[in-house]
Amino acid sequence: MRCTAACQKRGFTLVELMIVVSIIGVLAALAVVGVSRQLAMSKTAEAKLVVGAITRSAVTQYYRERNTSVILPSGGVAGNTHVLCGAATPVPADFTQVQGTKYQPSAGPNADFMTGSHLAGWQCLGFAITQPIYFQYSYQVGGDYVSDGMPGAPLPSVEEGFEAAARGDLDGDGVASTMVRTGEVRGGEIVTSTQIYTNNDLE
């Protein structure tokens, strides 16, 4: 049966348009979810890289020969010692400064990653970040670990241990994500956890 001229000029029906709009809406929603997930994964990758770098700095500084400041007795000899850098102040100090937002570390003297001394803190580790960060970074020694109480977290089993950690809340919903790597001194050598422990890594 041949279509008439009126039939040939017919446009889309309302139902057809609604179906097309629905399909586009579903595809757009899937794209938004996918992009959001990829962005969260890239920000989480930043935290894992930084935690790894802090751990490497802690190990490197432990193996440096450090002379302790003492007054030697007559005929005494100064001994070189291997010691872990003391704990560092978390950056930023207030966790709310990275909840759903970025934090710009200060490069000023005695601020953020510029704090510490040759035996403790970020200066001892020789570690600093100048770019904006999405996570709060910390380095703890001997206790008060961020991962304490988290299921399956590899806490150091000796007093001479450390934890490099990142805590964040990328979507600002109040649920924190945590990434840590720990290490401890055994017989004068540092043993670190086999991989970075994560808890709610995409939060």
Image: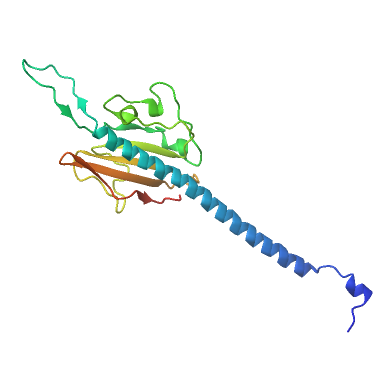
Compared with residue 20, is residue 143 higher up or lower down, i.e. above or below?
above
Query: What residue is drawn where x is 17% and y is 38%?
Result: 188
Horizontally, residue 156 falls left or right of residue 23, namely left
- Spot occupied by residue 174 in the image (x, y as percentages of width and height): 45, 45
- Front-lying residue, 80 or 123: 80
- Spot occupied by residue 18 in the image (x, y as percentages of width and height): 73, 65
Residue that lies at the very extreme toward the right in this rendered image: 5
Query: What residue is drawn where x is 89% and y is 69%?
Result: 9
The image quarter in which residue 66 lies: top left
The image quarter in which residue 69 lies: top left
Compared with residue 77, is residue 175 higher up or lower down, i.e. above or below?
below
- Spot occupied by residue 54 in the image (x, y as percentages of width and height): 34, 37
Horizontally, residue 169 falls left or right of residue 189, namely right
- Spot occupied by residue 120 in the image (x, y as percentages of width and height): 28, 28
Whether residue 193 is visible: yes
Query: What residue is drawn where x is 45% and y is 43%?
Result: 46
Residue that lies at the very extreme toward the left in this rendered image: 74
The image quarter in which residue 1 lies: bottom right
Compared with residue 24, is residue 57 higher up or lower down, i.e. above or below?
above
Compared with residue 56, is residue 36 higher up or lower down, i.e. above or below?
below
Which colour style is shown? rainbow
